[in-house]
Structure formats: structure tokens, C-alpha cells
């Protein structure tokens, strides 16, 4: 289970790509071209990257309003995502979904809900479908500490344990739900990890360490593939930017600047980059090349999005029902 | 349960035969145009018709499964699911925890994962725990992702009534669900339709909600053995008449039909329409009838304000106004929670006599 | 905390009263005069009796469809209950509620829901109201193992722990929800007792032992009164009769007759009676007197109910709104 | 949030002054009949008006408290609850977990326990998680127990719109709630009413749902400083007219008013009615107006089918049919989930021009 150099470079690459995409969105957001609420993933990249590195194309993910990282890490096409943020017909959801409703069927992303907790049972149901069809597929559900307030998490976990479903629950505890700290909403300093160990593999880990995330998820996914049932992984992390929109739009005063600063210093991307450099797994040249490639991809994706056609009034009544 | 003493087995009225036309299923078993009076015709109960549809769907399509609290228990959802687990196994016909919120989402997820769940809730009252998944998720999923994904699932619930079921166990909530774009809503009234519409719902690639009614469950009607579908979105005329159009939902079709038969003796000929599907609604059928009769009475098992009768009345006031010769009448339950006591229940529930009075008022311009 | 002889006699008396009322309803149910679904409490009497013996008049209870025992143990008037089952205007809910919707404001029973799990947050909210008003009142919530499937239990527990609400959660695990055994619905052989011990006092006890129920609840109620927060008590027990209606109406075959027999032998009423006789706390004469009194009370209540007026159509539109 | 760029601050239109009459509150501060053009009159925003109502209720009645996700955060529910926790403390103005199902029940319980909770949900979409407590519990509790108990609580939610809020963050779900007996439903359209109806709702001994709209939030109107109430169940005429009655809900009152002003120049005089309360609905006011105009256009921010426009149209088709000279027109959002893209949003949302067209069609019998 120890990672090859190749795999480590892959992890870093995924994290970098997510980070740069988020930064670009952030910096262009005030232009008002992306007329959709964005929830940026900066600071949490290690989680989506580590988790998705353990998955196959046909494995499923389900996520939430803060889904750009999950979408990209699972193999999502950046052009289709950016076009969606620009509300174009070429977007992954053809401009009907916007930033909070990404989809990518080819990579097992069956659609994203912006109702907090809403995706948890849906991801559980995907696990049920895989089990009933005896498919060797795993379903991963990403959700925040806010979603862990919702009873549907417990109902879903209970069901997954009862049926030994191939589902991995990944809770990203970034300490906040909008302006509410986790501890003003939950009764303990870690969310309950439900079930006896034989029924639920559960772990609380540093979500800013991509290799730890990878390794923990790897075990969980193995378990799921062997029919041993669900797992629950709580990843501690931090959302560096505001809840939604860009920095300039974040209300002031609800977070201690020192807290933000401390977490900025624990930036998962910088830390992992430094680690791989010190391990000799990547060097400055390779990094520069990766950055250049990513930049080119982002430029192309933004250009694609901007040039793409907008849906028109004539499209409005499409797709209410599936034939 | 003392239900049998409230409503014993009865045969369905002899409706116009045209309602018996089904269409071919995905299993391609086309039935001959079906004749009500053919010899050797089979009469089965409404519960049996539903049960047969489920059984046939389970046997024809490996993706179909049946879930819900008590689907595998001895009462088998008032008979609708009875013994299916014995034939198809508990892997495909299974009980669930009492966690309607998550299980509804699990059904959505299973549908996205390639299955065709049929989720039984024994009463619509419990669907209120499933609203987030039904309305925010299932009904929007296809549209919200530009058509990339679809959610073929069936939710089913059966309206309770009588024996003090009271406020939380007897709500006919179709008025809520009729408002939700992206959801198809079916309320059959005959055994034939119960089977054919269940098969259509399962075959449909969208979320479909079927609301049945306990008052229908013990009625017996003519039902072909082979699988067939009844088209979603098509109503039928249950009785022809020139004086007034009566649109009635679910078990009120029988009540309206009996009222109409009685009134024929008094010189009023009421046309009785069974919309069968509330969403999409067969607006043409209703408008075309009102164009002939000029009068409309709408009857629903739910509450009056903001419910099914409101939509049908408003639709005609908007699109069929020119034909109307009299105020539209709405016959629906009063705007109250259902009371428990039987004397209050008697005052609460509407039926044949209320419909009769509304017809007379609409046709003659005054109370009976 | 050890019970006086007086208190023990009181417990037995409450249990006997509930048992005899339930038996009478059972035996008269097929007459079809009580036109309301009844969910009988036979076999579970020790729980309501033990719990309510720790409470004061102004403390609140909230329960569920199987509420006759809770209503009576908390001090509810039998006449008003029977009149409600006969759907009379003199019923505690004036005939609008029926068997599943009992109310008794005077004794802190603020209304009973028949939506499984529906009463749990309501009882929690009563605790919140007491806390906000700094009242020395405790709120007890009774619910079944079926309700423990519902996410609302976890949401409520979390909130009660967070706010240290004066709420005692009493789960009556009678092994069944209609025809579903607890273990086909829940992933373990006991429901999770959420929270660390300092946040939630929790216990799983023999619910057929009224003194144990009393003592455990007593601790929980003390804690609540002191502002130390909520408790969760799981009581194992058994519903001897069918889910609803009378014996003749219970579907056959879903329970092993041997299971029923084994629990019949553990009948809490008989066992406690035998214990108190052997302890010399009650004797045959006292028991006979109690039985006679109870019978007379029941006779009177049935007569009262039968003679009471029925609500009429003119009453239908009463009380939709409160002035 | 880029909201300010969608709808900047504006003053309310100069409606008929009769809408400004409040009535005395429980604090017995009766205001003189309020004059729109008195000197020194105070104009504040809709958010400020709501905030002031809450603040006054909190200070007048110790039983009142405010709960909900983010009520104490810097944005303060779009301003409606901003800074209240600073004055009244976090014991009375507090944040909640994201557990809408249980917290709704906790609010019901707190009301039963002697408090008067005001529970803020920032969008109606999230109320779908609270349906069981709202519909099965709060709305039925008083009736179900024969009047023995009551549930004085206020639920509040604000309809989102624009900026790609999309299908799950911009639903105007009043069509669902209008169907529920036992629930009062308020949708104000002016700052004056936002304050007065909030105070009425808090004073009411029943569950009341207030649905506000983001489009109203930045408008500025004349609002007296002292506490006052506006009666629940009473609509007002915002503009007099003889040719057609336009009933419009929430922010569409402004749209209808502007359309009516424009059409005055083209010889059509439209009467604009703001029902303010959808349940109970001021049927008399609407019927009386239709009796004079003979024509009806109904406008709602929600979906068309089975929604608010259906009920109002049906009510008139039933009780005011004799006055009607033309088909009733319904102007409402199309029966679709809200699309995210702004070009689709533009096609989706209705406004002044749609109302204008409907008025012309209704009055002249043909499209503009
Ligand atoms: C059911 C529901 N309630 C409230 C909201 C509003 N809301 C959107 S995101 C959010 C915070 C979610 O916090 P968390 O799950 O921790 O995710 P994070 O934003 O921290 O990534 C809230 C309250 C919602 N979308 N859905
Ligand atoms: C939300 C909801 N789902 C389903 C039902 C139907 N129902 C009524 S009682 C019951 C079983 C409840 O079991 P439990 O909570 O263990 O209580 P018990 O009957 O065993 O006392 C069910 C499923 C309901 N009333 N409410
Ligand atoms: Mg968070
Ligand atoms: Mg049980």
C-alpha cells in the first residue's frame, strides 16, 4: 500500500490542478461572468485527491455544494466544468446546474446536490445498486461537518452497515458550516463514528495529509470490494477562503484571523510539494512543467467556456422528463 | 383490522367499456382490445391487480425491486405486495428500517445506479418525511443535469380512511405532489388501471408517485392476466352525459358514477371522467367534455383549498371559459385535519351525496 | 434511592392498573364500539410505571402510538381516556384524536403523535422551553426501537447534548416494529448510545424490572434537574400481543410462538407481584382489594364512555385555530 | 454576494395609501391612521422592517426567541436578524445545527412548553426537510387534541432568486403550504406589512409561515417606528381600476403595479390586489373587486400547476363566476425546476411584461 513515486506525483498533480483552478475562479469571480454561487475548495485538496486516487473510473462519487475538487479528482473534464460555471450549453450540466450541480456520468459522478446531507443517502443507494447487481464498484460519499448534523447521515450509515454496502463515507470536517463552528452545532469534538469495528471501519485522520488520506481510503475501498461493508473516514481540514464567492465577498469577523493564518501555514498543497521535493520525488523543473501544463489547461478551459454558446429560451423546456 | 367491516368486497360498477384498452408492455405482450363482457373474463381484487403487476415486473425485468416497511410481512401492504418475497426472494422484495428520509434517497441512488426501485410507503402521511428526496432530488435530477442522468423509480402510498385513522394516518396528499414539476402522479380507480398503470410507472424512466386508496382495495374488477400498460397522462370517460362534466379522482369515481346513475332517473345526464393521472393531466379530455356539457364538477379525496380540485377548476376557467355556463363546483374534503371520531368522520368525508348535490346545483343553479 | 414499601406498592398498583385496562380493551375490542386503532401495552408496563414514578406532575412526557401506559402512569384520567377510545366529546381529545392521540395538559402530557419518531424532537423542545424559562421541570420522551431507526432521534440527541437539555430519552426496545424484528432494521444488537459519558448518561437495562427502571430513571432525572443534561435509557422488553387491534386480529406467523411464550413467562406484572408478595410488601388481601378497585374504576370508565355524548357534525369545524 | 447587482435599493411604488393602516399590537401602541405623505416620515428597507419587528417582539415578550442557521452571523439572514443577538443575547437569538427535521420539532415542543419560537430557514427549499413537523404535527396539534393545546410558532423562509441559485435554492413553495389546513401563510410585499405581519404572526397562537422574497429585501418603504400589527387574512387594494382585477403575490405586486401604471396610458385601468396572507385568503376582497371588473389575472412567484394561482382562480370560478366576462389568466413560473444559467433564468422568471400581456389578453381578448 505504500505509494510509488509515480503515484505520489499523481497525487500532487491532482492537488495542484484543483488549487490552480480554484485560484483562477477566485481571481476572476468579481468579473461577474460566472453567475453562479461558487464554494471554493482551497485548503481541502488533499482529501478529494487522496480519496479519488484509490478509485477506478467506474466507482462512483457523490458530493455537495463544495464539489469542484471532487469532480476534478475523479477525472472530471475541466472544460465541461468551467463551461458549467459560465452557464453554457457545453457545460457538464448544459448550463442548467451551475457550480453546485456538477455531473460526470462517465466517471461515476451521478450528479451533485446542494441540499446539505442530500447526497449521503443517494451515494448509499448507489452502493445498494452495485451490491444488488454484483458489480465490483464502490460508492464514495463526500460531505462536510455540516452534513453530519443531519439525521440522514445516521439513517444512511445504519442502512449501509445493516446491508454491508460498498460505501465509503468521507466527512470533511473543515471546522465550519457557513459561519457556524462545528462545536456550536455538535456535542463533541469529533463526530460519532457509528458502529462496532466489525461493522464499520472508521477513522479520524489529518485530512491535509494526502498520503494518509490515500492509505486510509485504500483500506476502506478494499473492505468495500471484499463485501465487508462500509467505512467512515473523518478528515480534519480547513476551508481557507470564505464559505461562498470570492475573498472580497466573505463577511468579516466570524473567524479569528489567527486561526486562518495557522491553517494557511498548514497548506496541504505547499506542504506536500515540499515533502516530495525533499524526498526527491519531484524537482523544481518537473514542478514548473506541471504548473505550466495546468495553466495552459485552465486558460484553454476558460477560453472554451467563454466562447461556448449560451442556452436560449428555446431550451428551457428540455429535459423535464426522460423519454 | 376492522377494515372489512367498513368496506366489504364489491364489484366495480359497469363503466363504459372504452376504459379497458391497455397497450403493449415492454414485454411486448399486446392484448387484443379487451372486452368487458367476453366469456371467461377474470375478476380479481384491486390488491391482487397491483400484486400481479409487481410480480410481472419482477419477473420481466431483473432491475426491478420492491422495498418498504412491511412489504414482506403477512399483511403485505394490504395485499399489494403479499408473498412476492416468497417468489422473488428477500433480495428483491425487502423490508426497510423506519427511516423514510434516507431510504427515499437510497431509492434515488439505486435508480441512478441502474436499478428500478418500487418503494412502498403504506400511507401518504409518511411521505412528508421523504419530501426532500422526492421534491429536491428525484423530481429535479434529470432536468438539473441537462438530461445526463435519470431516476426511474416508483413511490407508492395508500390513503387511509376510517376507523379513527385520524389526522396523521388518513391524509390524501395528492394536492401537494401535483404541484411538483418533474414528478408524475397517478391515482387509479379501477383494478384494470391499477395493474396497467403500475406497469407503466415501473417502465417509465422518471420518478412516479402512485397514490392508491384503501376504499378501492377490496373492489373487484376485470383484469387480463398478461402484462399490459395503461398510458400515463390519459384519462377516460367512465360514463357519457350531456349536462355536466364530473371529474372525480380515485375512489370518488365510483361515487360520482353512482350519483350520475341515480340522477339519470331525474333527467340529469352527467359525464364522468376519471383522469387516472393527475400529472400530467389529460387536459384535452376534460376540456373537450366541458365544451359539450358547459358545466363542471370536480371531486377529490383531498383537502379543497389549493388542492387537485383547484388546479382542474383553474385550468378550465383559463382554457375552457368560453364553454362554461355555470360556476364550477368543487367537492373535496373540508379544510381540516381528519378527526378521529366516527361521527366526525361521517361529517368530514365526502361521497356520492355531496357529488349529487353539487351536480344538481351546477345543472339547475340551485340546491337539490 | 432504595424504594420504600409504599413506593413499591405504588409501582405495582400502576402496572396492574395499566394491565387491566389493556386487557379490558382487548376483550371488548371486537364489539366494534371503540372505532380507533389500539396499540396495547401488555408486557411493557414496568417501563411507563417505573419512569413516571420518578416524575412530578409538572414534568412532561411525550410518547407514541402505544401510549395508553404512558398516559395512565403519568396520572392520566381513565375516564377521559376511555371516552377518547369511544370517540366521545368527553374524551381527553374530545373525540378528535382517538387512541393514538391522547393528551393531558394537567399532567404534562402535551399531546401524542402517531408518526413514529415524531414526538422525539417535540419532547426535546419541551426540555428547551423548560431550560429557557429556568423551570425545574424535566421532559421524558418514550419511543420504540422502530423510532430509533429515524434520524430525528440522532438530531434530537445531538441537540439535547449540545444544550444540556433536561430531557430523558426512554427507548422501549420490544424487539419488533409491526412485523419487523429490530435486528433486520438496525445494524447491531443494541442501538447506539450516543455521546461520551460526561455528555450523555446512558444505560441499557431490563425493561421488565420496574425497580431497575425506576432507579435508572431516577438518576437520569436528577441529572436533568441539576442541569447536567440529557440521558438515554434503553429498556429491553416485549410486546406480548399483536402490533395493533386485538389478539384475533394479529396476523399469524411472523413471530415464533416460543418467543412469545418465553416472554409471557417473564411477564413483568406477575413477576413483580410475586416479588412483592415474597418480600411481604403486599399480601393476597391487599392485592384482591387493589384488583377490585381497579375493576370498579374500569367499569365506571367504560360506562362513562358509553354514556357520553358523541361529537356531531356541528363540532367538525371547531378548533382548527386557537384564538 | 452579487445580489446587489441584481436588484439595487429602490423605493417602493407609491401605492394607494389605504394599505398603511396597522392596528394596535399587544403592546397597545396604537398608531394614528398612518399618512404616506406626512412630514418626517421614515423610510427603511424591508430587511430593516423585519429586523425591527423581531427586535420589538423580543423586547415586548420574554417568551419570544429567534432560532435558525446563521441568525447570529454577520449576514444575519439577509439582514432580517442582523445583530439581534447583540441586544438580546445568544440565549434568545441563536444558531442551530443543520438538522431541520428535528429542530422544527424542537420549535413545536418549545411552543408547547410556553415559548414563542421564530424559526428562520433561509430558503423554502430547506422547509422540505421540515414537512413532517410542519404538516403532521404543528398544523394539526390544536385540532387533533380538541383544542387542549396550541402551537404558537413562526416559521420564516426567504425565496432565493437569480445568480444561478438553481433548482434547490430558489423554490417559491407557497403552493405546497397553501394546501395545509391549520397553517397560516403570509407573503408580504411592502416594508410596512413585513413589520406588521411579522408582529401579527408572533402574536398569533397558531403556527404561521412567513415566506419572504429576496427581490423585496432591498426595497425601501415607509414604516412607523412603534410596534403595530397588520391583520392576518386581510388583503389590500394597491391600485384602483375598473377593467380587470390583478391579484399578485409578494414581489409581483410591484411588477403588477408597474404594469398597471403603464397600461393606464393605453386605456386599461387595472385594479391591483395584494392578498398579503394566502391562508386565510381574503376572498371577499377579491370577489368584490372581480364583481366590479369582471376580469381576473392571478400572478404568483411559484409554479403554475396546482399552486397559488390555481386556488385563487378556482375560488373565483366557483364563487364569482357570475361576474366573469373573460377567461381567468394565470401568470406564474413555468412548471420546471429553476435552471441555473442566467439566459435560462431570464426565460424562466415572470415579471411585469408577462403580467402586462396577460392583462391585455384578458381585457381585449387577444395578445398584445
Ligand atoms: C438542508 C440544508 N440546510 C442548509 C443549507 C444552507 N447551507 C449551504 S452550505 C451550508 C454549510 C455546510 O457546511 P458543511 O457541510 O460543513 O460544508 P462546507 O461548506 O464546510 O464545505 C449551509 C448551511 C443547505 N444548502 N441545505
Ligand atoms: C414515520 C412513520 N413510519 C411508519 C409508520 C407506521 N408504523 C406505525 S407503528 C410502527 C412500528 C413502530 O415500532 P416501534 O417504534 O418499535 O414501536 P412499537 O410498535 O414496537 O411499540 C410503524 C412502522 C408510522 N406511524 N410513522
Ligand atoms: Mg464544514
Ligand atoms: Mg418496537
Image: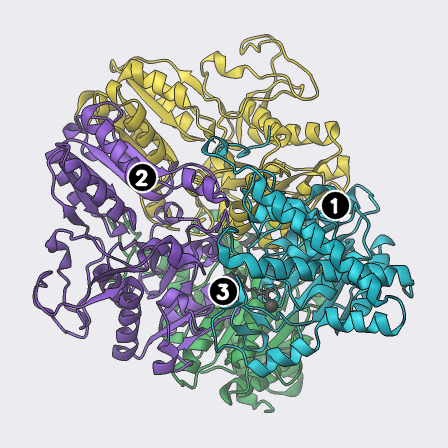
Chain colours: A green, B purple, C cyan, D yellow
Q: CA distance from mark 3 to mark 1?
A: 43 Å
Q: Nearer the viewer, residue C226 or B81?
A: B81
The quarter of the image holding the C terminus of chain D is top left
- Does any atom of ligand 2 lie closer than 8 Å to the CB of label 1? no
Query: Disc 3 beta carbon < 8 A from ligand 1?
Result: no
**Mark 3, residue position:** A119
Label 3 residue SS: helix
Specify few, some or many for label 3: CA neighbours under 10 Å numbering under 14, 14-19, or 20 or more.
many
Q: Is residue B36 above or below residue C112?
A: below
Residue bearing mark 2: B309
Q: Distance between the Cα atoms at labels 2 and 1? A: 43 Å
Mark nearer the viewer, 3 or 1: 1
- Answer left or right for B366 relative to D259: left
Residue under label 1, please give it: C107
Which label belongs to residue C184? none
Q: Residue at x 31, y 52 (%)?
A: A310
Q: Residues within 10 Å of mark 1 (few under 14, many from 20)?
A: some
In terms of secondary structure, where does tag 2 sit? helix
Residue C250 pos. (x, y %): 50, 68
Pointer 3 indicates a residue of which chain? A
Ligand 2 in which quarter: bottom right
| Residue at image location 23% in from the left, 24% down from the top | D362
Q: Quadrant of residue A206?
A: bottom right
Answer yes or no: is residue B284 visible. Answer: yes
* Distance between mark 2 and mark 3 Cα atoms: 35 Å
Tell me residue D183's x, y (percent). 52, 37
Residue at 49 percent across and 12 percent down: it is D17
Amino acid at each position: 500500500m505504500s505509494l510509488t513515486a509515480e503515484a505520489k506525483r499523481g497525487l500532487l498533480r491532482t492537488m495542484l490542478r484543483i488549487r490552480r483552478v480554484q485560484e483562477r475562479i477566485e481571481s476572476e469571480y468579481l468579473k461577474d461572468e460566472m453567475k453562479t454561487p461558487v464554494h471554493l475548495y482551497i485548503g481541502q485538496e488533499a482529501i478529494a485527491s487522496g480519496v479519488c486516487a484509490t478509485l477506478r473510473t467506474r466507482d462512483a462519487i457523490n458530493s455537495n455544494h463544495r464539489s469542484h475538487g471532487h469532480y476534478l479528482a475523479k477525472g472530471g473534464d475541466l472544460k465541461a466544468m468551467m463551461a458549467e460555471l459560465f452557464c453554457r450549453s457545453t457545460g457538464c450540466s448544459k448550463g442548467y446546474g451551475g457550480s453546485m450541480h456538477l455531473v460526470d456520468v462517465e466517471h461515476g459522478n451521478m450528479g451533485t446536490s446542494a441540499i446539505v446531507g442530500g447526497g449521503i443517502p443517494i451515494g448509499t443507494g448507489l452502493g445498494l445498486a452495485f451490491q444488488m447487481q454484483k458489480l465490483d464498484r464502490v460508492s464514495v460519499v463526500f460531505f462536510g461537518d455540516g452534513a453530519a448534523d443531519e439525521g440522514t447521515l445516521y439513517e444512511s450509515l445504519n442502512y449501509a452497515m445493516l446491508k454491508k454496502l460498498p460505501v465509503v463515507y468521507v466527512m470533511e470536517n473543515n471546522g465550519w458550516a457557513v459561519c457556524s463552528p462545528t462545536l456550536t452545532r455538535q456535542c463533541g469534538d469529533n463526530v460519532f463514528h457509528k458502529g462496532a469495528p466489525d461493522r464499520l471501519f472508521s477513522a479520524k485522520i489529518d485530512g491535509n495529509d494526502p498520503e494518509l488520506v490515500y492509505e486510509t481510503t485504500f483500506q476502506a475501498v478494499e473492505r468495500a470490494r471484499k463485501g465487508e461493508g462500509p467505512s467512515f473516514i473523518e478528515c480534519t481540514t480547513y476551508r481557507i477562503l470564505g464559505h461562498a464567492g470570492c475573498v472580497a465577498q466573505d463577511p468579516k469577523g466570524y473567524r479569528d484571523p489567527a486561526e486562518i493564518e495557522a491553517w494557511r501555514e498548514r497548506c496541504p498543497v505547499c506542504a506536500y510539494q515540499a515533502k516530495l521535493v525533499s524526498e526527491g520525488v519531484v524537482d523544481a523543473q518537473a514542478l514548473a512543467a506541471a504548473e505550466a501544463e495546468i495553466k495552459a489547461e485552465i486558460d484553454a478551459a476558460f477560453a472554451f467556456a467563454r466562447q461556448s454558446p449560451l442556452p436560449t429560451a428555446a431550451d428551457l423546456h428540455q429535459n423535464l422528463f426522460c423519454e | 383490522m376492522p377494515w372489512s367491516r367498513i368496506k366489504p368486497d364489491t364489484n366495480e360498477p359497469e363503466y363504459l367499456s372504452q376504459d379497458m384498452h391497455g397497450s403493449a408492455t415492454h414485454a411486448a405482450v399486446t392484448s387484443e382490445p379487451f372486452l368487458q363482457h367476453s366469456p371467461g373474463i377474470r375478476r380479481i381484487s384491486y390488491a391482487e391487480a397491483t400484486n400481479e403487476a409487481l410480480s410481472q415486473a419482477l419477473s420481466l425485468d431483473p432491475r426491478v425491486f420492491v422495498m418498504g416497511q412491511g412489504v414482506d410481512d403477512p399483511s403485505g401492504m394490504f395485499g399489494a405486495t403479499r408473498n412476492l418475497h416468497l417468489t422473488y426472494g428477500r433480495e428483491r422484495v425487502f423490508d426497510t428500517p423506519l427511516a423514510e428520509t434516507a431510504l427515499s434517497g437510497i431509492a434515488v441512488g439505486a435508480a441512478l445506479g441502474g436499478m428500478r426501485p418500487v418503494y412502498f410507503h403504506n400511507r401518504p402521511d409518511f411521505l412528508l418525511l421523504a419530501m426532500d428526496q422526492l421534491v429536491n432530488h428525484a423530481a429535479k435530477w434529470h432536468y438539473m443535469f441537462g438530461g445526463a442522468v435519470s431516476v426511474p423509480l416508483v413511490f407508492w402510498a395508500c390513503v387511509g380512511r376510517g376507523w379513527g385513522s385520524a389526522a396523521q394516518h388518513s391524509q390524501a396528499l395528492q394536492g401537494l405532489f401535483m404541484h411538483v414539476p418533474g414528478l408524475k402522479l397517478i391515482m387509479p380507480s379501477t383494478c384494470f388501471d391499477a395493474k396497467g398503470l403500475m406497469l407503466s410507472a415501473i417502465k417509465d424512466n422518471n420518478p412516479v408517485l402512485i397514490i392508491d386508496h384503501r376504499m378501492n382495495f377490496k373492489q373487484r374488477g376485470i383484469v387480463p392476466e398478461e402484462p399490459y400498460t395503461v398510458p400515463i397522462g390519459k384519462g377516460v370517460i367512465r360514463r357519457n352525459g350531456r349536462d355536466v362534466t364530473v371529474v372525480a379522482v380515485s375512489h370518488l369515481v365510483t361515487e360520482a358514477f353512482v350519483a350520475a346513475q341515480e340522477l339519470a332517473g331525474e333527467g340529469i345526464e352527467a359525464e364522468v371522467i376519471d383522469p387516472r393521472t393527475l400529472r400530467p393531466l389529460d387536459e384535452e379530455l376534460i376540456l373537450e367534455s366541458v365544451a359539450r356539457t358547459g358545466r363542471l364538477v370536480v371531486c377529490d379525496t383531498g383537502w379543497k383549498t389549493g388542492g387537485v380540485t383547484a388546479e382542474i377548476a383553474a385550468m378550465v376557467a383559463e382554457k375552457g371559459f368560453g364553454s362554461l355556463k355555470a360556476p364550477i363546483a368543487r367537492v373535496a374534503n373540508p379544510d381540516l385535519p381528519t378527526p378521529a371520531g366516527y361521527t366526525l368522520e361521517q361529517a368530514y368525508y365526502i361521497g356520492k351525496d355531496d357529488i349529487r348535490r353539487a351536480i344538481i346545483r351546477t345543472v339547475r343553479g340551485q340546491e337539490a
